[in-house]
Amino acid sequence: MAIDFLVHEAGDGVGVAAVEGIKAGQDLTGWIMQEDQTITIKVLNDIPIGHKIALKDFAVGDTVFKYGTDIGKVVASIKKGEHLHVHNVKTKRW
């Protein structure tokens, strides 16, 4: 089974694209490293390698966790399977 994205731990809300050429509508397989489990998700957008995929729905104001760490707050609603990046998540640092 090919792995398309990586998730550090089950509590994370995002996975990281580990392959090139992810296109909207694809069914992807992800590996949750800490728990050594696989999950599947249908992506709603093209996702560049190294970018994040939402693993659940997020509302404006929600906190996003990656690698068990708060990486920012949602500034535009995000659906499960959508591209999660600087256009819809901002750091809380400033």
Image (tube, helix red, strand yellow):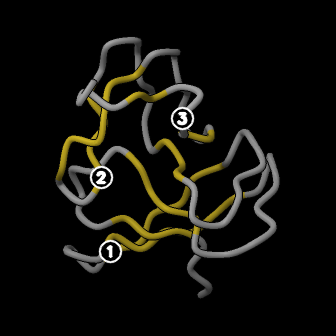
Residue bearing mark 1:
37
Q: Residue furthest front?
A: 94
Residue 66, numbered circle: 2
> Within the image, what quadrant is residue 33 found in?
bottom left
Mark in front: 2 vs 1: 2
Residue drawn at the location 45% of the way across and 44% of the way down: 55
Q: Is residue 29 left or right of residue 13?
A: right
Residue drawn at the location 28% of the way across and 24% of the way down: 94
Q: Secondary structure at mark 1?
A: strand
In the displayed structure, 46 sits above or below 73; it is below
Report the front residue among 59 and 69: 69
Rounded to the nearest angstrom, the CA distance separating label 2 from label 3 is 14 Å
Q: Secondary structure at mark 2?
A: strand
Residue drawn at the location 24% of the way across and 57% of the way down: 10
Residue bearing mark 3:
86
Mark in front: 1 vs 3: 3
Horizontal and vertical percent for residue 1?
Answer: 59, 87
Q: Is residue 73 left or right of residue 77?
A: left
Horizontal and vertical percent for residue 5?
Answer: 53, 68
- Specify few, some or many for label 1: CA neighbours under 10 Å numbering under 14, 14-19, or 20 or more: few
Mark 2 is on which residue type? Lys
Mark 1 is on which residue type? Gln
- Specify few, some or many for label 3: CA neighbours under 10 Å numbering under 14, 14-19, or 20 or more: few
In the displayed structure, 82 sits above or below 69; it is above
- Specify few, some or many for label 2: CA neighbours under 10 Å numbering under 14, 14-19, or 20 or more: some
> Within the image, what quadrant is residue 51 found in?
bottom right
